[in-house]
Image (spheres, rainbow, N blue to C red):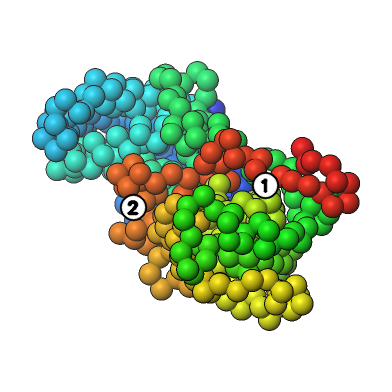
Amino acid sequence: MQASSSPLPKGLQLLPERFSRADNHNVAPDLAKGVGVLVKSAWDGSMITGLGDGIPLAEAIQRCSAELDAAAMAYLATMMAEIEAVVGAGNFKSEVFSKDVITAFTSLKKVDFGGMRTAHWDNIQGALSKNEDSWRSGPHKIEVFTIQQFCLRMVQFAESLRQRTGQCIDVEAEVSAPVSVPATAAAAARKQLNYESSTRIVFGPRWPGCIIEPDWAKLYGKGNEDEDEDEDGPWLTPRMAMKIHHIAVADAESLIDIHPRLPKIARPFFKQSKAWRLAFRDCYARIGMRMQKGLPPTPNCTGEEMAFHNIMDRVPDAEDSLNDEVYNALPKYPNDDNYFDVTDLAIEDEDILMMFEDDDNGYDSSDDGDVTNVDNPILGPGSMASFALGSGGDMLRVANMHPQDWFLAFREKRFHDHEGIDMDSMQTMK
């Protein structure tokens, strides 16, 4: 078995790189660095201090093979029964769980970390923690403790990566992994059309010619809605449409300088990822371009939902910066100031607002206002955002809530519905 003087195995060498590649928006660079430090200290025996001479990870694994086997068997016996009692035997795939646990411990004993997934690290530390009473009084308690702490720390890094970036290292496992790596729901979702990878709009080659000032009364006046209109007029009146369009275009151009309202989990993306920042700015532009075509400003991705909420926060003050002559010439309706109904009818749900934690006003332009690391989670425990982005997401039936997925189109058939007539070229945008 390898000792501390032996070279670091390839699987451990690649762990920091796996974290780095998974962080494709570079919003958590500290994680790859932290994993590198953890791996080095575990391999040379300096990870655990205060317990006498440190034991290198490889030696710890070699010395306590019997304890590892006992912990794995005990974990399989107790956890399967406990899980089945909670979810029901028919809802629990015991063979998959058994295979994952056995694979995790087999790879560990071989010091083969190339195919280790998050579940493997979690199963090892879970088994050693649950069986702690048995090895705590044994001859190799420091060895087992070393392995337990290393795996526990890896689980913490992996969870921080998932929470902060919306990604995981599982898809970065080596091709030679002992078990196949399943496609995650997030990976499957990213096959959707993605506005982030489309041609930029704001300050792109067709900007600002793609923005026009249409005949708002013709597009949104009475008689332009399918349903019967009440005496208050359309739910989206010409004056309301002009105000929304004005704020959407103005904010699209100035967004980089104004620090838009964003939940805490999204602010690192805006601050540190140029691609994400520009994609979010285009969300405002698409809303404005739909408006000038006579379409409702219905968002087609989570980023547009957040942008629309921000737009509607500013719409009540839009008259101060509008062309008075054009605005005053538009017909008046009681619904001109019905901002609540417009928001309610334009957006299918309020799921994006769950990303705001208590006491988070959504603004933080300082360089260090959102300091986050593996020991300082970006989301508080028990928060609605943490629940929705974790185990509760399926239960709540929310999708694309993590900033990583904000630009995935809800409906592919609407992916191009913002494209229209360019005033400069009078050609249909492609």
Three-letter code for the amino acid on which mark 2 is drawn: Phe
Q: Quadrant of residue 150?
A: top left
Between 67 and 249, which is closer to the camera in this rendering? Answer: 249
Quadrant position of the C terminus in the picture: top right
Between 48 and 352, which is closer to the camera in this rendering? Answer: 352
Name the residue rendered at 16%, 25% in the picture.
Answer: 90
Name the residue rendered at 30%, 44% in the picture.
Answer: 395
- The mark found on residue 418 in the picture is 1
Residue 129 shows up from this direction? yes
Q: What is the distance, in whole Å, between disc 1 and disc 2 at their CAs?
A: 33 Å
x%, y% of residue 253? Answer: 74, 63
The answer to which of marks 1 and 2 sits earlier in the sequence is 2
Outermost residue on the right side: it is 425
Which structural element holds mark 1? loop
Which structural element holds mark 2? helix
Q: Which residue is mark 2?
A: 387
Q: Is residue 121 left or right of residue 221?
A: left
Viewer-nearest of labels 1 and 2?
1
Between 122 and 13, which is closer to the camera in this rendering? Answer: 122
x%, y% of residue 427? Answer: 84, 42
x%, y% of residue 178? Answer: 42, 19
Name the residue rendered at 68%, 81% in the picture.
Answer: 320
Three-letter code for the amino acid on which mark 1 is drawn: His
